[in-house]
């Protein structure tokens, strides 16, 4: 198992209000049985470009390999947006990219 930093890009159909942002961040930083989504020091978890509706999530997940890490990050991103009140079709999530690995 290793810790992977995964960058997940995407777009949103409507602006991310402050309450939605707080909810989204609480999900990605929340307690997960395998500690996916814990806050990483010096990691800017969410970057938004409001006028364009684009975002980048940077998530740390624990996984056995790159593929599983990408899948875990996608699942975490979807859960966060659903919890923040976004419905299917109002968020487009792109292909996750591994941007850091710590295999221990």
Image (spheres, grey):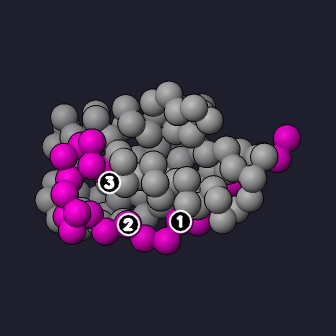
Residue at point 85% right, 41% down?
A: 104
Sort mark 2 into few (<14), some (14-19) or many (20+) by Cα contacts within 10 Å: some
Q: Nearer the viewer, mark 3 or mark 2?
A: 2
Query: Height in image: 77 above or below 17?
Result: below
Judging by the rendered image, the residue that carries numbered circle 3 is 48
* Quarter of the figure with residue 6: bottom right
Pointer 1 or 3: first along the chain = 3
Residue at point 53% right, 65% down?
A: 96
Please tell me which residue lies in front, 84 or 51.
84
Judging by the rendered image, the residue that carries numbered circle 1 is 96
Q: Secondary structure at mark 1?
A: loop
Query: Height in image: 98 above or below 77?
Result: below
Chain part drawn in magenta: 81-104
Disc 2 and disc 1 in contact, CB within 8 angstroms: no
Q: What separation in Å lies between label 3 and label 2 (alpha carbons)?
A: 13 Å
Query: Height in image: 102 above or below 30?
Result: below
- Give residue 93's mark: 2
Q: What separation in Å lies between label 2 and label 1 (alpha carbons)?
A: 8 Å
Q: Secondary structure at mark 3?
A: strand
């Amino acid at each position: 198992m290793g810790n992977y930093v995964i960058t997940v890009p995407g777009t949103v159909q409507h602006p991310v209000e402050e309450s939605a942002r707080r909810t989204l961040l609480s999900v990605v930083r929340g307690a997960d049985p395998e500690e996916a989504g814990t806050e990483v020091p010096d990691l800017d978890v969410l970057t938004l470009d409001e006028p364009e509706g684009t975002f980048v999530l940077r998530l740390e997940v624990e996984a056995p390999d790159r593929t599983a890490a990408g899948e875990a990050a996608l699942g975490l991103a979807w859960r966060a947006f659903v919890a923040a009140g976004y419905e299917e079709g109002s968020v487009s999530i792109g292909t996750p990219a591994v941007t850091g690995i710590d295999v221990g």
